[in-house]
Image (cartoon, coloured by chain):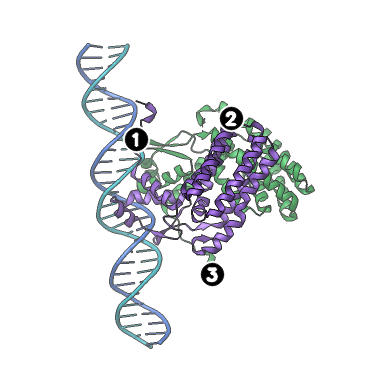
Chain colours: A purple, B green, C cyan, D blue
Amino acid sequence: MDIARITIAPSTSAQVHDWLRKRVQQGDLPPGMRISETEVAAAIGISRQPVREAFIRLASDGLAEVRPQRGTYISKISVQAVLSARFIREAVEADLARIVAKARPAEILDRMADEIARQHHADTAGSVEDFIESDDRFHHMLALAAGQDAVWADLERLKAQMNRLRHLSMRAFDRSFTIGQHQAILDALRQGDADAAEGAMRTHLRQMLTEVPQMAAAQPDYFTA
Amino acid sequence: MDIARITIAPSTSAQVHDWLRKRVQQGDLPPGMRISETEVAAAIGISRQPVREAFIRLASDGLAEVRPQRGTYISKISVQAVLSARFIREAVEADLARIVAKARPAEILDRMADEIARQHHADTAGSVEDFIESDDRFHHMLALAAGQDAVWADLERLKAQMNRLRHLSMRAFDRSFTIGQHQAILDALRQGDADAAEGAMRTHLRQMLTEVPQMAAAQPDYFTA
DNA sequence: TTCGCTTCACTGGTATGGAAGTATGGTATA
DNA sequence: TATACCATACTTCCATACCAGTGAAGCGAA
């Protein structure tokens, strides 16, 4: 038996937290929705305590807001938080792009090309979920190629608010546009042109600057300043 | 009465969390130390439940590790996490420096000069705590000057591991050296030289690249890969 | 001495009851 | 009709009790 496969069942509290987190990220639990310890506990068939602890974890993630003696609510998407995360992403991934353009690790660049192909397929198939996952893997590989895997883990935490937003948008138009930008980034990386790679990445990530305010205006109930 | 002053007492759990967090950051609770729900509860004079919830919050901050049925331990300082946060800081603050060099907001640049003066005082007085706080304010103001206050809040979360490390080091030598680098950054900002400002900031933040491995080697019990 | 087993104190995890605070809708009063 | 009051049904928060897993100490046999 593979010794690395020895694992213990996560606590109920942790499982509830994972379940809630995914549902929030996918927009299943909409921003502003009220959730209750009692109701969730009854729905799952457990006591209130583990649910309560899951709520606390969710609040630490910035995905819920616990108002004492009043209720617990799914956080609205903070425009400021999204723009802040975007700013950080642009700065970090610009540096990553420069590093990768200089190193040019063939294997990983090939895998990035594979992801672009997958994005084409997901686009024509209309599979939003697949597209988003491939998009994330594309950017993740950039961090990998730069030898900065841990950096991507940190970005993932910051992206929490951004991810919810993406599930709300992602129309067909945006997707083909995004694929083109990915291709431009990869081309520059392949040519070892650090300036071009950085520029393409910044252009790509600045796309959000126009999209976010539009989406906030379209669905004001889901957003907060 | 000032309506903005209406406030409610934070929950016991939140207060315990704040208390523990500060003690961990200041190195009062050393990395690897075991903490117990029962002991902390008895020491404060409350039940285990709020303490337990404070532990969960602390674990979300990455400052503690709860091992089921075994015990809860103060996290060791992850070298990888520190280096990752450093990488992100360099990328972000380099961009911030460029923005501020172009805008040159006189008022905030003056306040940054004030902080450098405070750092001189704290250095000669040997007050490590004052020095670290002023250091943070200096960098915080850079974000303010760039109109990206929220970005600094995100960086603060990433800096959690780094802050603990700083309380372990900060010898007299490092401090005067640091002040010189701050001055170089400010000079470049004042002259509106974006390239020089970015370069000075990157040099300043790369200082850690040599310091961190040294400290990890000096006190291996406090660190993990 | 060394190995293996049992025991037991102690850990975090869960269930449950009640305390304190809040919002809501009904009701008496002017 | 409008307003002040209050009963009530929630909410989260805390205390308590019990559960299950862990690991080290103690003991005995090889």
- Look at 46% across and 33% down and name the residue there: B32
Marks 1 and 2: CB-CB under 8 Å?
no
* Chain at numbered mark 2: B
- Vertical relation: A126 (above or below) A147: below
Specify few, some or many for label 1: CA neighbours under 10 Å numbering under 14, 14-19, or 20 or more.
Answer: few
Q: Residues under labels 2 and 3: Cα distance? A: 51 Å
Q: Depth check: give the residue in front, B60 or A122.
A: A122
Does residue B126 appear anywhere in the picture? no
Marks 3, 1: nearer the viewer: 1
Q: Depth check: give the residue in front, B26 or B189.
A: B189
Residue A4 x %, y %: 39, 28
Specify few, some or many for label 2: CA neighbours under 10 Å numbering under 14, 14-19, or 20 or more.
Answer: some
Residue A189 x %, y %: 64, 37
Q: Name the residue under label 1.
A: A8
The label on residue A51 is none
Disc 2, SS: helix
Q: Which amino acid does label 1 sit on?
A: Ile
- Vertical relation: B215 (above or below) A47: above
Q: Mark 2 points at which residue?
A: B215
Task: Let me know if marks 2 and 3 both belong to one chain.
Answer: yes
Q: Residues under labels 1 and 2: Cα distance? A: 35 Å
Residue B108 x %, y %: 71, 53
Query: Which image quadrant for residue A213?
Result: bottom right
Q: Residue furthest right?
A: B191
Q: In which quarter of the image is the N terminus of chain A?
A: top left
Q: Depth check: give the residue in front, B224 or B103.
A: B103
Q: Name the residue under label 3.
A: B1
Is B146 on the left or on the right of A52, as rendered?
right
Is B198 on the left or on the right of B58, as rendered?
right
Specify few, some or many for label 3: CA neighbours under 10 Å numbering under 14, 14-19, or 20 or more.
Answer: few
Q: What residue type is labelled 3?
A: Met
Marks 2, 3: nearer the viewer: 2
